[in-house]
Amino acid sequence: MAELEQLREDTVIQGPFFDERVRIIAVRNLGDGQVNIIGEGLKTHAVHRPVIPLSELEKIEVVSQRSLRFDGDPEAFFLFMEAQRMRNAYQFDPLYAVNVSMVDPLPHQIEAVYHYILKNPGIRFLLADDPGAGKTIMAGLLLKELKYRGLVERTLIVVPGHLKDQWVRELKEKFSETFRVVDRPALDSSWGRNVWTEENQAIASMDFCKQDEVMYTLQDVPWDLVIVDEAHKMSAYRYGEKTDKTRRYRLGELLSKNSRYLLFLTATPHRGDPENFRLFLDLLEPGFFSSTEMLSESIREKDNPLFLRRLKEDLKNIDGRPLFLPRHVRTVKYRIGENPEEFELYNEVTRYVRYHYNKALQ
Protein backbone atom coordinates (compact mmCIF):
# COMPACT_ATOMS: atom_id res chain seq x y z
CA MET A 1 0.00 0.00 0.00
CA ALA A 2 1.49 3.34 -1.07
CA GLU A 3 0.84 6.89 0.02
CA LEU A 4 1.37 9.94 -2.17
CA GLU A 5 4.41 11.04 -0.13
CA GLN A 6 6.16 7.74 -0.91
CA LEU A 7 5.87 8.14 -4.68
CA ARG A 8 9.14 9.91 -5.34
CA GLU A 9 11.56 9.86 -8.25
CA ASP A 10 13.46 6.55 -8.70
CA THR A 11 10.99 4.63 -6.51
CA VAL A 12 10.10 1.22 -7.97
CA ILE A 13 6.40 0.34 -7.79
CA GLN A 14 3.96 -2.29 -9.06
CA GLY A 15 0.19 -2.65 -9.18
CA PRO A 16 -2.87 -3.23 -11.38
CA PHE A 17 -2.24 -0.01 -13.31
CA PHE A 18 1.01 -1.41 -14.81
CA ASP A 19 1.83 -4.70 -16.54
CA GLU A 20 5.38 -4.63 -15.16
CA ARG A 21 7.38 -3.05 -12.40
CA VAL A 22 7.95 0.64 -13.01
CA ARG A 23 10.59 3.12 -11.89
CA ILE A 24 8.99 6.49 -11.23
CA ILE A 25 10.25 9.39 -13.34
CA ALA A 26 7.82 12.04 -12.10
CA VAL A 27 4.52 12.38 -10.19
CA ARG A 28 2.05 15.19 -10.98
CA ASN A 29 -0.87 16.06 -8.74
CA LEU A 30 -3.67 16.97 -11.18
CA GLY A 31 -6.17 18.10 -8.55
CA ASP A 32 -9.74 16.86 -8.37
CA GLY A 33 -8.45 13.83 -6.47
CA GLN A 34 -6.26 12.50 -9.29
CA VAL A 35 -2.52 11.98 -9.75
CA ASN A 36 -0.51 11.30 -12.91
CA ILE A 37 2.39 8.84 -12.47
CA ILE A 38 5.04 8.83 -15.19
CA GLY A 39 7.40 5.88 -15.06
CA GLU A 40 9.72 3.61 -17.04
CA GLY A 41 9.12 -0.13 -17.24
CA LEU A 42 12.03 -2.14 -15.86
CA LYS A 43 11.69 -4.88 -18.51
CA THR A 44 10.43 -3.13 -21.63
CA HIS A 45 11.73 0.37 -20.83
CA ALA A 46 8.37 1.59 -22.10
CA VAL A 47 6.96 4.82 -20.63
CA HIS A 48 3.80 4.48 -18.50
CA ARG A 49 1.54 7.50 -17.84
CA PRO A 50 -1.59 6.34 -15.93
CA VAL A 51 -3.90 8.85 -14.22
CA ILE A 52 -4.91 7.30 -10.90
CA PRO A 53 -7.50 8.48 -8.34
CA LEU A 54 -5.98 9.18 -4.94
CA SER A 55 -8.37 6.67 -3.45
CA GLU A 56 -6.78 3.93 -5.64
CA LEU A 57 -3.18 4.55 -4.50
CA GLU A 58 -3.61 1.85 -1.87
CA LYS A 59 -3.50 -0.71 -4.69
CA ILE A 60 0.08 0.35 -5.55
CA GLU A 61 2.90 -1.48 -3.81
CA VAL A 62 6.29 0.14 -3.23
CA VAL A 63 8.96 -2.42 -4.19
CA SER A 64 12.06 -0.35 -3.44
CA GLN A 65 12.74 3.23 -2.55
CA ARG A 66 15.90 5.27 -2.69
CA SER A 67 16.80 6.72 0.64
CA LEU A 68 19.52 9.12 1.63
CA ARG A 69 22.11 7.76 4.06
CA PHE A 70 24.77 9.70 5.91
CA ASP A 71 26.56 6.85 7.66
CA GLY A 72 29.08 6.09 4.87
CA ASP A 73 32.86 6.30 5.07
CA PRO A 74 33.69 10.03 4.83
CA GLU A 75 37.24 9.41 3.59
CA ALA A 76 36.02 7.13 0.79
CA PHE A 77 33.40 9.72 -0.17
CA PHE A 78 36.05 12.45 -0.26
CA LEU A 79 38.37 10.33 -2.45
CA PHE A 80 35.50 9.56 -4.82
CA MET A 81 34.61 13.22 -5.17
CA GLU A 82 38.26 14.14 -5.72
CA ALA A 83 38.53 11.51 -8.44
CA GLN A 84 35.45 12.91 -10.17
CA ARG A 85 36.80 16.45 -9.87
CA MET A 86 40.14 15.45 -11.36
CA ARG A 87 38.46 13.44 -14.11
CA ASN A 88 36.53 16.47 -15.34
CA ALA A 89 38.89 19.29 -14.35
CA TYR A 90 40.45 19.59 -17.83
CA GLN A 91 37.09 20.83 -19.14
CA PHE A 92 37.39 23.92 -16.94
CA ASP A 93 41.17 24.45 -16.92
CA PRO A 94 42.67 24.94 -20.40
CA LEU A 95 46.19 24.28 -19.04
CA TYR A 96 45.35 21.47 -16.66
CA ALA A 97 48.49 19.39 -17.25
CA VAL A 98 50.62 22.45 -16.52
CA ASN A 99 48.95 23.03 -13.18
CA VAL A 100 49.28 19.44 -11.95
CA SER A 101 52.92 18.99 -13.01
CA MET A 102 56.16 20.11 -11.37
CA VAL A 103 57.16 22.34 -14.28
CA ASP A 104 57.13 26.04 -15.11
CA PRO A 105 56.71 25.85 -18.87
CA LEU A 106 57.93 28.56 -21.19
CA PRO A 107 55.58 30.27 -23.68
CA HIS A 108 56.85 28.29 -26.67
CA GLN A 109 56.25 25.01 -24.83
CA ILE A 110 52.63 25.89 -24.04
CA GLU A 111 52.15 27.10 -27.59
CA ALA A 112 53.43 23.84 -29.08
CA VAL A 113 51.30 21.54 -26.90
CA TYR A 114 48.05 23.48 -26.69
CA HIS A 115 47.98 25.50 -29.91
CA TYR A 116 49.55 23.04 -32.35
CA ILE A 117 49.53 19.42 -31.19
CA LEU A 118 46.29 19.17 -29.20
CA LYS A 119 44.30 21.05 -31.84
CA ASN A 120 44.63 18.01 -34.13
CA PRO A 121 41.89 15.41 -33.48
CA GLY A 122 44.27 12.62 -34.53
CA ILE A 123 47.67 13.50 -33.10
CA ARG A 124 50.46 12.51 -35.52
CA PHE A 125 53.05 15.23 -35.10
CA LEU A 126 56.75 16.05 -35.48
CA LEU A 127 58.17 18.51 -32.95
CA ALA A 128 61.47 19.68 -34.43
CA ASP A 129 62.60 22.63 -32.29
CA ASP A 130 66.28 23.44 -31.84
CA PRO A 131 68.21 21.78 -28.96
CA GLY A 132 67.44 23.31 -25.59
CA ALA A 133 63.78 24.03 -26.32
CA GLY A 134 62.61 21.46 -23.76
CA LYS A 135 61.05 18.84 -26.00
CA THR A 136 60.94 16.35 -23.11
CA ILE A 137 58.78 18.76 -21.10
CA MET A 138 56.45 19.26 -24.06
CA ALA A 139 56.12 15.51 -24.51
CA GLY A 140 55.37 15.10 -20.80
CA LEU A 141 52.69 17.80 -20.91
CA LEU A 142 51.07 16.12 -23.90
CA LEU A 143 51.11 12.73 -22.16
CA LYS A 144 49.60 14.19 -18.98
CA GLU A 145 46.89 16.11 -20.85
CA LEU A 146 45.82 13.08 -22.89
CA LYS A 147 45.75 10.85 -19.81
CA TYR A 148 43.53 13.25 -17.87
CA ARG A 149 41.18 13.46 -20.83
CA GLY A 150 40.82 9.69 -20.76
CA LEU A 151 42.33 9.28 -24.23
CA VAL A 152 45.57 7.51 -23.32
CA GLU A 153 46.25 4.52 -21.12
CA ARG A 154 49.08 2.64 -22.84
CA THR A 155 52.21 4.63 -23.74
CA LEU A 156 55.51 3.56 -25.30
CA ILE A 157 58.52 5.87 -25.42
CA VAL A 158 61.39 4.95 -27.77
CA VAL A 159 64.67 6.79 -27.19
CA PRO A 160 68.41 6.44 -27.83
CA GLY A 161 69.88 3.96 -25.35
CA HIS A 162 71.85 6.51 -23.33
CA LEU A 163 68.71 8.61 -22.67
CA LYS A 164 66.50 5.91 -21.11
CA ASP A 165 67.34 6.70 -17.49
CA GLN A 166 67.05 10.45 -18.11
CA TRP A 167 63.52 10.04 -19.51
CA VAL A 168 62.48 7.80 -16.62
CA ARG A 169 63.80 10.30 -14.08
CA GLU A 170 62.28 13.41 -15.67
CA LEU A 171 58.84 11.85 -16.16
CA LYS A 172 58.82 10.73 -12.53
CA GLU A 173 60.13 13.97 -11.02
CA LYS A 174 58.23 16.45 -13.19
CA PHE A 175 55.01 14.60 -14.05
CA SER A 176 54.68 11.83 -11.41
CA GLU A 177 54.55 9.25 -14.21
CA THR A 178 56.23 5.89 -13.65
CA PHE A 179 57.72 4.12 -16.68
CA ARG A 180 59.45 0.75 -16.79
CA VAL A 181 62.52 0.24 -18.93
CA VAL A 182 62.08 -2.73 -21.25
CA ASP A 183 65.42 -4.14 -22.38
CA ARG A 184 67.00 -7.49 -23.14
CA PRO A 185 67.00 -8.75 -19.49
CA ALA A 186 63.34 -7.73 -19.12
CA LEU A 187 62.43 -9.51 -22.34
CA ASP A 188 64.36 -12.66 -21.45
CA SER A 189 62.90 -12.82 -17.93
CA SER A 190 59.35 -12.83 -19.29
CA TRP A 191 59.71 -16.11 -21.19
CA GLY A 192 56.36 -17.36 -22.45
CA ARG A 193 54.76 -13.93 -22.00
CA ASN A 194 54.80 -10.72 -23.99
CA VAL A 195 56.28 -8.07 -21.73
CA TRP A 196 54.85 -5.29 -23.92
CA THR A 197 51.28 -6.30 -23.12
CA GLU A 198 52.02 -6.34 -19.39
CA GLU A 199 53.34 -2.77 -19.24
CA ASN A 200 51.06 0.21 -19.78
CA GLN A 201 53.97 2.67 -19.64
CA ALA A 202 57.24 1.47 -21.14
CA ILE A 203 60.52 3.02 -22.28
CA ALA A 204 62.88 1.20 -24.61
CA SER A 205 65.98 1.82 -26.68
CA MET A 206 65.49 2.38 -30.41
CA ASP A 207 68.36 0.05 -31.30
CA PHE A 208 66.92 -2.63 -29.02
CA CYS A 209 63.47 -2.35 -30.56
CA LYS A 210 64.76 -2.50 -34.15
CA GLN A 211 66.03 -6.08 -33.73
CA ASP A 212 63.96 -8.60 -35.65
CA GLU A 213 62.99 -10.75 -32.67
CA VAL A 214 61.97 -7.68 -30.66
CA MET A 215 59.94 -6.24 -33.53
CA TYR A 216 58.19 -9.62 -33.75
CA THR A 217 57.01 -9.24 -30.13
CA LEU A 218 55.89 -5.66 -30.86
CA GLN A 219 54.03 -6.23 -34.09
CA ASP A 220 50.60 -7.04 -32.63
CA VAL A 221 50.76 -4.82 -29.53
CA PRO A 222 48.54 -1.70 -29.70
CA TRP A 223 49.55 1.59 -28.07
CA ASP A 224 47.48 4.68 -27.37
CA LEU A 225 50.51 6.97 -27.57
CA VAL A 226 54.01 6.41 -28.93
CA ILE A 227 56.74 9.03 -28.44
CA VAL A 228 60.03 8.71 -30.33
CA ASP A 229 63.02 10.83 -29.34
CA GLU A 230 65.77 11.50 -31.91
CA ALA A 231 63.24 10.27 -34.44
CA HIS A 232 65.33 11.41 -37.43
CA LYS A 233 67.38 8.23 -36.98
CA MET A 234 64.44 6.33 -38.51
CA SER A 235 65.48 7.13 -42.05
CA ALA A 236 64.93 5.81 -45.55
CA TYR A 237 66.51 6.74 -48.87
CA ARG A 238 65.23 6.62 -52.43
CA TYR A 239 67.49 5.76 -55.36
CA GLY A 240 65.51 6.11 -58.58
CA GLU A 241 62.52 3.79 -58.18
CA LYS A 242 64.05 1.89 -55.28
CA THR A 243 63.55 2.83 -51.61
CA ASP A 244 66.14 1.66 -49.11
CA LYS A 245 64.57 1.36 -45.65
CA THR A 246 66.83 1.03 -42.63
CA ARG A 247 65.87 -1.21 -39.71
CA ARG A 248 65.02 1.84 -37.68
CA TYR A 249 62.69 3.01 -40.43
CA ARG A 250 60.93 -0.36 -40.47
CA LEU A 251 60.53 -0.01 -36.70
CA GLY A 252 58.92 3.38 -37.34
CA GLU A 253 56.48 1.80 -39.80
CA LEU A 254 55.50 -0.81 -37.21
CA LEU A 255 54.98 1.76 -34.45
CA SER A 256 53.01 4.01 -36.78
CA LYS A 257 50.66 1.16 -37.63
CA ASN A 258 50.15 0.11 -33.99
CA SER A 259 49.70 3.53 -32.38
CA ARG A 260 46.67 5.77 -32.09
CA TYR A 261 48.71 8.92 -31.38
CA LEU A 262 52.30 9.39 -32.51
CA LEU A 263 54.78 12.11 -31.54
CA PHE A 264 58.26 12.46 -33.05
CA LEU A 265 60.94 14.58 -31.39
CA THR A 266 64.13 15.69 -33.12
CA ALA A 267 66.31 18.75 -33.46
CA THR A 268 67.61 17.77 -36.91
CA PRO A 269 64.62 16.73 -39.01
CA HIS A 270 65.98 17.66 -42.44
CA ARG A 271 69.30 16.39 -43.78
CA GLY A 272 69.20 18.44 -46.95
CA ASP A 273 67.43 15.68 -48.89
CA PRO A 274 63.74 16.55 -49.53
CA GLU A 275 62.87 12.98 -50.52
CA ASN A 276 64.41 11.63 -47.31
CA PHE A 277 62.33 14.12 -45.31
CA ARG A 278 59.15 13.19 -47.18
CA LEU A 279 59.72 9.51 -46.42
CA PHE A 280 60.31 10.42 -42.78
CA LEU A 281 56.95 12.25 -42.62
CA ASP A 282 55.32 9.22 -44.23
CA LEU A 283 55.79 7.48 -40.88
CA LEU A 284 53.37 9.98 -39.34
CA GLU A 285 50.76 10.09 -42.11
CA PRO A 286 51.53 7.71 -45.00
CA GLY A 287 51.03 9.44 -48.34
CA PHE A 288 50.19 12.84 -46.82
CA PHE A 289 52.74 14.48 -49.11
CA SER A 290 52.67 12.69 -52.45
CA SER A 291 55.72 14.53 -53.81
CA THR A 292 58.66 16.61 -52.66
CA GLU A 293 57.19 19.58 -54.55
CA MET A 294 54.03 19.44 -52.45
CA LEU A 295 56.11 19.18 -49.27
CA SER A 296 58.33 22.13 -50.27
CA GLU A 297 55.28 24.27 -51.01
CA SER A 298 53.74 23.37 -47.66
CA ILE A 299 56.93 24.36 -45.85
CA ARG A 300 57.17 27.59 -47.81
CA GLU A 301 53.55 28.55 -47.08
CA LYS A 302 53.84 27.45 -43.41
CA ASP A 303 50.49 25.69 -43.56
CA ASN A 304 51.49 22.10 -42.77
CA PRO A 305 49.70 20.32 -39.89
CA LEU A 306 52.37 17.66 -39.35
CA PHE A 307 55.38 19.42 -37.89
CA LEU A 308 56.61 22.48 -36.04
CA ARG A 309 60.17 23.80 -36.10
CA ARG A 310 61.47 26.83 -34.21
CA LEU A 311 65.05 28.03 -34.01
CA LYS A 312 66.77 29.18 -30.84
CA GLU A 313 66.42 32.76 -32.03
CA ASP A 314 62.61 32.34 -31.98
CA LEU A 315 62.42 31.20 -28.35
CA LYS A 316 61.64 33.78 -25.66
CA ASN A 317 60.89 33.73 -21.95
CA ILE A 318 57.67 34.90 -20.34
CA ASP A 319 58.93 38.50 -20.38
CA GLY A 320 59.57 38.38 -24.13
CA ARG A 321 63.36 38.30 -23.82
CA PRO A 322 65.35 35.81 -25.94
CA LEU A 323 66.23 32.58 -24.16
CA PHE A 324 69.53 32.20 -26.02
CA LEU A 325 72.15 34.75 -26.90
CA PRO A 326 72.73 35.42 -30.62
CA ARG A 327 75.02 32.97 -32.39
CA HIS A 328 77.98 34.32 -34.35
CA VAL A 329 79.82 31.76 -36.49
CA ARG A 330 83.31 32.44 -37.75
CA THR A 331 86.36 30.44 -38.76
CA VAL A 332 89.38 30.78 -36.48
CA LYS A 333 92.80 30.24 -38.08
CA TYR A 334 95.61 28.78 -36.07
CA ARG A 335 99.13 27.46 -36.60
CA ILE A 336 100.07 23.93 -35.64
CA GLY A 337 103.12 23.85 -33.42
CA GLU A 338 106.52 22.56 -34.34
CA ASN A 339 105.88 19.26 -32.57
CA PRO A 340 105.48 16.54 -35.27
CA GLU A 341 103.06 14.67 -33.02
CA GLU A 342 100.54 17.51 -33.44
CA PHE A 343 100.75 17.13 -37.23
CA GLU A 344 100.25 13.39 -36.89
CA LEU A 345 97.20 13.83 -34.63
CA TYR A 346 95.66 16.41 -36.97
CA ASN A 347 96.16 14.20 -40.01
CA GLU A 348 94.78 11.09 -38.30
CA VAL A 349 91.65 12.89 -37.08
CA THR A 350 91.10 14.37 -40.55
CA ARG A 351 91.48 10.96 -42.15
CA TYR A 352 89.06 9.39 -39.68
CA VAL A 353 86.39 12.02 -40.30
CA ARG A 354 86.86 11.92 -44.06
CA TYR A 355 86.68 8.15 -44.45
CA HIS A 356 85.58 6.12 -41.42
CA TYR A 357 83.05 8.54 -39.86
CA ASN A 358 81.23 9.18 -43.14
CA LYS A 359 81.32 5.47 -43.92
CA ALA A 360 79.68 4.72 -40.56
CA LEU A 361 76.91 7.25 -41.29
CA GLN A 362 76.12 5.48 -44.54
Image (spheres, rainbow, N blue to C red):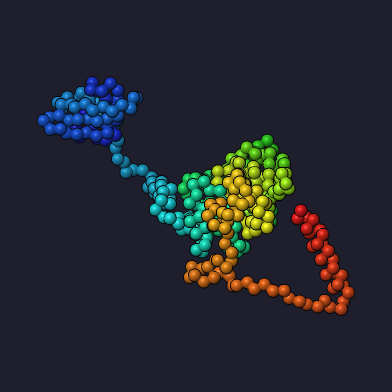
Give the image location of residue 135, x and y in percent.
Answer: 58, 58
Quarter holding the N terminus is: top left
Q: Nearer the viewer, residue 82 or 95?
A: 95
The number of callouts visible is: 0
Q: Is residue 147 left or right of residue 55?
A: right
Residue at 71% x, 49% y: name it.
Answer: 237
Q: Is residue 188 left or right of residue 130?
A: right
On the question of residue 313 being in view, the answer is yes
Residue most extreme to the left = 32
Give the image location of residue 287, x and y in percent.
Answer: 60, 44
Give the image location of residue 50, x and y in percent.
Answer: 21, 26
Give the image location of residue 337, x and y in percent.
Answer: 84, 78
Residue at 46% x, 48% y: name it.
Answer: 149
Residue at 68% x, 35% y: name it.
Answer: 192
Residue at 48% x, 70% y: name it.
Answer: 319
Q: Nearer the viewer, residue 109 or 351?
A: 351
